């Protein structure tokens, strides 16, 4: 007996036969780390009286609206810049650093953590496949575009850890030591060509320049001084500029974003734009033409503070060389953290710790609009997509 199967039926059968997570092959992956143990109490980051597990949410940012693909348990922390997540260029794995953990001796307190989770994004479902110990208080995490090297800033010991990468396996390859445990290395980012990395140091208000030669990473000893408490950091995909957000003292002062020229004889700060109170996350669009910046806007201080606001801000700037021109802004949730772009530049995700959610924001090149929300378990504290 001969059976005939229509083309449509064959496609339907093939789709049904695919593993659930195979949609990742057609997705743009965004990874959000979520802190389940921290809450904001009268303007102070505190240990929750009813903590839940820290989690990681894997999101398909390549569809509209973005959709959650998976959620799993992994340690994370809101302490540190919202760049404690890094996604491999081929989206095969992600790294999530955890700066703080509950004190085993007193769960009402938090103490520095030392864990870096390696998450297999191709597994069905995604899973933590290794837990490494880069150093005390790991925060900012970066993977070079070749997918061969990772750097992790250890904020509580004044170092940057170096890891070589083979597939999704990481191997320790030493550290860069700034010689001061209180220097507070916070964010670290590779240049697109992988030959340089920048590191913000919010403990001594400096930005360090590292030289990268294969697996050999060294401190050039060159530093830049821009603002008070340089924190989040990003380099444009064009490789011509970097931007640094400054936090200040969260006292109500308007804080700047510094623009670093990378095309001269050596990196140096050449421009500054004002954004809002307490600059937190920032990210370039994939084409490098726009910059998104998160301002906590007084939403993380006590309600009695003279400059308290019950909302954060997402601000977008157009990039023209070393000049940034404000395009628009939109209100988002309180105590906001990181931000990520879709590849086409039409959708952004902006995190809010208080809302336990990510705002879905549309962008048409001229204006921003909140169009939805993705709820997560815990407060979203860091987010990244792959850098190409």
Image (cartoon, rainbow, N blue to C red):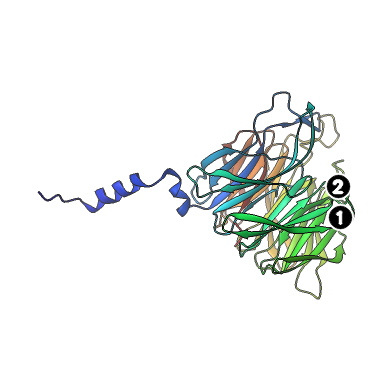
Quickly name the residue at label 2.
248
Disc with the residue nearer the chain's start (2 vs 1): 1
Q: Residue 129: percent from the left, percent from the top?
A: 58, 46
Query: Between 346 and 249, which is closer to the camera in this rendering?
Result: 249
- Mark 1 surroundings: few (<14), some (14-19) or many (≥20) residues within 10 A: many
Q: Which of 314 and 155 is in front in this view?
A: 155
Kindly give the residue lying farthest to the top in the view shown: 49
Is residue 38 visible in the rendered structure shown here?
yes
Is disc 2 in contact with disc 1, using a CB cutoff of under 8 Å?
Answer: yes
Q: Where is residue 180 in the image (x, y as percent from the top left)?
A: 90, 53
Q: Residues within 10 Å of mark 2 (few under 14, many from 20)?
A: many
Residue 208: give x, y in percent of width and height: 83, 61
Separation of marks 2 and 1 at Cα, in angstroms: 8 Å
From the top left corner, tell me how far across and down residue 13 is, in percent. 29, 46
Mark number, residue 142: none
Residue 334 position (above or below residue 367): above
Quarter of the image containing the C terminus? bottom right
Residue at 67% in and 33% down: 36
Q: Is residue 331 above or below residue 134?
A: above
When the figure is inspected, residue 351 is found, relative to residue 225, above or below; the finding is: above
Q: Is residue 154 left or right of residue 144?
A: right
Depth order, front residue of 312/386: 386
Question: Helix or strand or loop: what does disc 2 sit on?
Answer: loop
Q: Is mark 1 on a helix, strand or loop?
A: loop
Residue holding disc 1? 227
């Amino acid at each position: 007996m001969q059976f005939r199967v229509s083309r449509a039926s064959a496609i339907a059968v093939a789709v049904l036969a695919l593993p659930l997570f195979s949609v990742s092959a057609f997705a743009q992956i965004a990874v959000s780390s979520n802190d389940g143990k921290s809450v904001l109490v009268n303007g102070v980051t505190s240990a929750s009286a009813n903590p839940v597990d820290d989690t990681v949410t894997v999101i398909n940012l390549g569809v509209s609206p973005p959709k959650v693909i998976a959620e799993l348990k992994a340690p994370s922390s809101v302490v540190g810049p919202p760049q404690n997540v890094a996604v491999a260029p081929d989206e095969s794995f992600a790294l999530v650093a955890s700066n703080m953990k509950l004190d085993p001796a007193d769960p009402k307190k938090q103490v520095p953590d030392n864990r870096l989770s390696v998450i297999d994004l191709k597994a069905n479902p995604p899973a933590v496949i290794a837990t490494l110990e880069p150093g005390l208080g790991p925060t900012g995490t970066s993977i070079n575009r070749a997918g061969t090297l990772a750097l992790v800033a250890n904020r509580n010991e004044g170092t940057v850890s170096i890891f070589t990468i083979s597939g999704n396996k990481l191997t320790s390859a030493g550290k860069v030591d700034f010689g001061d445990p209180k220097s507070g290395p916070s964010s670290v980012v590779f240049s697109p060509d992988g030959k340089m990395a920048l590191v913000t140091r919010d403990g001594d208000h400096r930005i360090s320049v590292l030289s990268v030669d294969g697996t050999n990473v060294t401190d050039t000893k060159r530093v830049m001084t821009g603002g008070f408490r340089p924190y989040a950091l990003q380099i444009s995909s064009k490789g011509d500029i970097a931007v640094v957000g400054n936090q200040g003292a969260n006292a109500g002062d308007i804080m700047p974003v510094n623009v670093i020229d990378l095309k001269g004889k050596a990196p140096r700060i050449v421009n500054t734009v004002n954004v809002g109170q307490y600059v937190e996350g920032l990210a370039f669009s994939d084409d490098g033409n726009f910059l998104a910046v998160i301002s906590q806007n007084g939403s993380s201080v006590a309600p009695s503070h003279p400059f308290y606001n019950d909302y954060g801000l997402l601000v977008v700037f157009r990039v023209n060389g070393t000049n940034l021109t404000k395009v628009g802004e939109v209100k988002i949730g309180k105590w906001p953290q990181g931000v990520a772009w879709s590849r086409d530049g039409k959708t952004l995700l902006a995190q809010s710790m208080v809302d336990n959610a990510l705002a879905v924001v549309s962008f048409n090149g001229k204006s921003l609009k909140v169009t939805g929300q993705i709820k997560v378990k815990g407060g979203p504290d860091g987010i990244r997509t792959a850098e190409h």
